[in-house]
Amino acid sequence: MKQEKIHPISLGRKRKRTKAVFVGSVKIGGDAPVVVQSMTSTDTRDIKATLRQIKTLEFCGCEVVRLAIPDEEALGAFGVIRKAAKLPLIADIHFNYRLAIGALEKGADGIRINPGNLSRARIREVVTAAIGRKAVIRIGVNSGSLQKDILARHGGPTAEALVESAMENIALLEDLGFAAIKVSLKSSDVPTMVRAYRLVSKRTRYPLHLGVTEAGGILGSAVKSSLGIGILLSEGIGDTIRVSVTGDPVDEVRIAYGILRALGIRQVGPDIVSCPTCGRCEIDLVSLVNEVEKRLAGMKDHLKIALMGCAVNGPGEASEADIGIAGGKGSGLLFKKGRVIRKVREKEFISALMDEIDKMIAERGRKHAIL
Amino acid sequence: MKQEKIHPISLGRKRKRTKAVFVGSVKIGGDAPVVVQSMTSTDTRDIKATLRQIKTLEFCGCEVVRLAIPDEEALGAFGVIRKAAKLPLIADIHFNYRLAIGALEKGADGIRINPGNLSRARIREVVTAAIGRKAVIRIGVNSGSLQKDILARHGGPTAEALVESAMENIALLEDLGFAAIKVSLKSSDVPTMVRAYRLVSKRTRYPLHLGVTEAGGILGSAVKSSLGIGILLSEGIGDTIRVSVTGDPVDEVRIAYGILRALGIRQVGPDIVSCPTCGRCEIDLVSLVNEVEKRLAGMKDHLKIALMGCAVNGPGEASEADIGIAGGKGSGLLFKKGRVIRKVREKEFISALMDEIDKMIAERGRKHAIL
């Protein structure tokens, strides 16, 4: 993805400049592109399954992976996984500060600590252990696990409560001379999440990790995550994003790149423009779109592909795309870079499209990966 | 849905006040809630299939349905459909102004005309036909079908080009004394669409119909539509929305309500909060979420349901929800309105949840529909 174009501006708003940190070799914040993260859903103790999932995530463009380390056995497995995996790995720690220290010793590129689940004294010990190592600490505040005193003061997990927890812990880390900090303030409520990040972005220059927490199944999460993460990115807020899906984490990465692509922030993967079909459509567009999506799954090269059912918007959209089909009755016009190149019968749509896509990618001098 | 709470404010931004129009009995603009629209994907000439789809859309909460009328045969079918269907119906017209006039004669509650596909002279005839009837006209500008002169002037389908087309046609309708106008400026490019609506909302007080056009398959559309429609709604712009999905229009309605619900604009349907699962999860959460989503499909009552995998955020989220489960090892704590009511074994999760949901809905004195 070296030739990927990076646009620091979305909807006219320049990205807020933050301090940069490194998670392994991946830069987050500063002038770095918005980084895509995910988290394994396997049992961390199952080394083989976890490594397989990390590889699949990497293949789909995930740039940083987080793993839960709930116990000593998972910590042991993490050591093996860290040695075998290429991507930067973050250890997700709750309740037990010794596991955080253990993960750092085993080479974690970063750890995520949840201020609500570790006492201030314990956080101090973790920070001391992290000093001298090149590990990042994310202060991962979450609406579901805020400190009791803060909850009581604010009457619930409000935006202000999330910010207070984050700022308190930033101060704690800074007092210990630690600066490789990322911050997240996730809420399962989109407006609360948006307001919390807006507030904190005015009060800190550490890079912000955006996410709507506990966002639900794939469709629900696509909606909530696009809203929460997208509204903030469009305001120039956010350095790395993690979409949360109850399901396959590969879908988290697909949705994340969908958000970045649609806002024009990162151009990774195919952008499919296709009409909703209506009483005017005379080709089987739904099957065509499904098949093209399936064939291009995992493709990192950016192409705008228009798959259109009729003559109303078909020629217009197809001519604005890199490659397009404007359907008619059982056939369609194949467009490439704004020009009609030939008429194609419906049963040859897929082969014609794939041929042209392959050619276009080859012309760019790069290979594309197909799952 | 009479008891639905309407919030005119999202993320602190008050909705921009527009003129109100009526599509049949449905008010759009002014102080009306943001109205959810969809469009049939059946062949309009297939009266049975089209009526079936309209009924399904109505069941799922769709409030206005649009149908394509590409020819005389479809126009004839539309007359029959109009008599049989309850929902307000909009006739979607391109190229042929006689079909627009015909649809108005057959009782269309509104027509959508595309300035790019009807000459100014023809629009004039359509408006003349609509005067005296209680039909609304949507000026439906689309990036794929802008007038050639405007495209040439702007060098492509830019936000400014979309706005110019809309403003020109508003003036045309106003000159003819017609005021029951809605306006849309759809682009398949999210930033263009957002900028176009922002611009036009400063220049007109007619209600705005929001949509990202040709938004792709279900997941791609969920992302693009949530971004485009969501960013605008969060700024107080938008009176009615249509999500465009290449696939089942029921998914358009699901996504639309998902956007409105997540922004706190309308509280329709269940809000499912569920964690992404990780190495810490000891229940089969993915199956649980899928099953709950399936069982509650079509439910219009609003309930916040938290389905959580472990003790990190589980109890916190479950206690913020109307009904929640915080999973442990093969079992979970059942929460209702912030209080633990009992421990439930994993295989009884579904029956326990559905019982509590039924009770809670019954307590509200309303029935809920299950597909």
Image (tube, coloured by chain):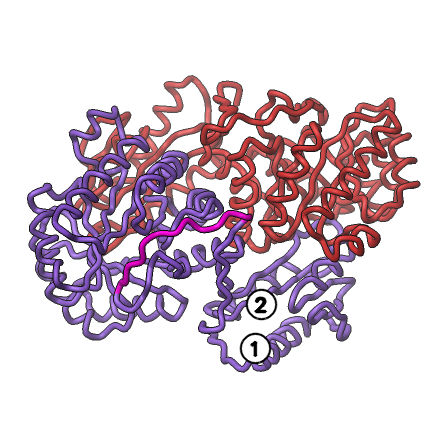
Chain colours: A red, B purple
Q: Chain of mark 2?
A: B
Task: Indicate whether residue B19 is drawn in magenta.
Answer: yes
Spatial separation of the CA atoms under disc 1 and disc 2: 9 Å
Q: How many marks?
A: 2
Residue B240 horizontal/vertical position (percent): 36, 55
Q: Is residue B247 above or below residue B108?
A: above
Q: Which residue is mark 2?
A: B303
Quadrant of the frame with the N terminus of chain B: bottom left
Q: Residue at x 27, y 42 (%)?
A: A308
Q: Quadrant of residue A342?
A: top left
Secondary structure, magenta segment, majority class? loop
Tag 2 secondary structure: loop
Q: Chain of mark 1?
A: B
Labels 1 and 2 touching (C-beta < 8 A)? yes
Q: Quadrant of residue A113?
A: top right
The magenta-colored residue range is: B11-23
Q: Is residue B1 left or right of residue B54?
A: right
Q: Which residue is mark 1?
A: B361
Q: Is residue A137 above or below residue B170?
A: above
Residue A318 horizontal/vertical position (percent): 26, 34
Residue A348 horizontal/vertical position (percent): 25, 40
Same chain for mark 1 and mark 2? The answer is: yes
Task: Indicate whether residue B188 is drawn in magenta.
Answer: no
